[in-house]
Image: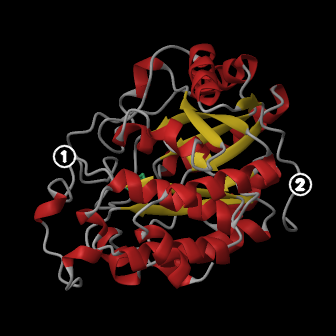
Amino acid sequence: LNRQDILDALTAPDARPLFRSAVQARRDALGDVVQVRAILELSSHCRSNCLYCGLRRDNTKLERYRLPPEDALETARRASAAGFGTVILQSGEDVREALGHIGHLVKAIRDSTPMSVTLSVGEWPREALATWRMLGADRYLLKFETSHDDIYRRLRPGRRLEDRLGYLRDLRALGYQVGSGNLVGLPGQTLGDVADDLLLMQDLDLDTWVIGPFRPHPDTPLADVRSLPVDRVKDARTQVLSLDLLDVVLRCVSISRLLSPRAHIPGTTALGALAPEGRLRALKVGANVLMQDVTPAAFRARYDIYPGRLVGDGDAWERFGAAARVAEEAGMTVQECPRAVEPRGTP
Ligand code: SF4
């Protein structure tokens, strides 16, 4: 698919042929099988100040926490016992966590469970990334959020898109399986920008493609996103914000599947927050991964990255069961994630 094909797919009056092709592509490449991954949120502290994120440094309303390391390990072990094949260790860019606990936790999980470990903890020096890889981290998730340089600079003060892409290249060179992706519905973003995001994901040859809807957080500068001036877009009809966001994201999921049939593509928790059946619908248009929050209940609601998060009830067993029911409703079966041991490069 070229850029025009993608734009045509994003704007076709009837999306059903696109959705059908994507499901067929997934079936041919991977079968109708869902991987269920556990998310464990280690810390809501962040040194960064991204305008779209509830964890941003300047959000003084947030009650921050750090998960005690022994609780994190115990929760990971319970997730493994419940059937999860992968745990995603997620955190704001918390210097104390990065310097102290992450490496130990990765090693302890790898030593005591058969799970793969994915890190989603932000931008850190290559030496830290290499150490975590050496200690057993298999995958790294680092979304670029937008391929549009101006939007990126505006929304991530002090950060540069080219640096982000450099981190993604480093991660690949260190032997990680790499996940990345975008936010759909950012202020000023057009369908052309979204098409460019998808082409960048293809260019990066990602193992996991993450397409998330932008959800304005009330305690951020983007709270009232629709009232923001959108200076770079002359024609309001091309703005993603003026469209049905769920529909655009579902089309992106399908297009992603066609661009990379063997990729792991989640029906994100943010999509579940956007629409009650968002994740189910993602599976029905080509996604193959569900992520379930297993963070201990006392902390789960405090990782307030965007509003209406799908935190769910219960412990790891209940969370795994809930995902299995969504998969079943989509006519798919759940597979424990195979351990990601095949490096893509040389550490
Ligand atoms: S998006 Fe990540 S780096 Fe940016 S403020 Fe949120 S947690 Fe921090």
Residue at x 51%, y 46% (from the top left corner): 96
Q: Tag 1: residue type?
A: Pro
Q: Is residue 152 left or right of residue 67?
A: left
Image-quadrant location for residue 273: top left
Q: Secondary structure at mark 1?
A: loop
User: Horizontal and vertical percent for residue 111?
Assistant: 84, 31
Task: Work out whether mark 1 precedes mark 2 in sequence or the reverse, and give the earlier one.
Answer: 1
Q: Is residue 130 left or right of residue 49?
A: right
Residue occupied by mark 2: 342
User: Considering only vertical position in the picture, is 50 above or below 64?
Assistant: below
Q: Nearer the viewer, residue 272 or 294?
A: 272
Q: Which mark is residue 218?
A: 1
Establish if 240 lies above or below 340: below
How packed mark 1 is, by other alpha carbons closer than 10 Å (few <14, some 14-19, many 20 or more), is some
Q: Measuring from the top left, give residue 332's x and y in whole percent.
A: 69, 32
Q: Position of residue 5 (x, y in %)?
A: 55, 79
Q: Nearer the viewer, residue 46 or 287?
A: 287
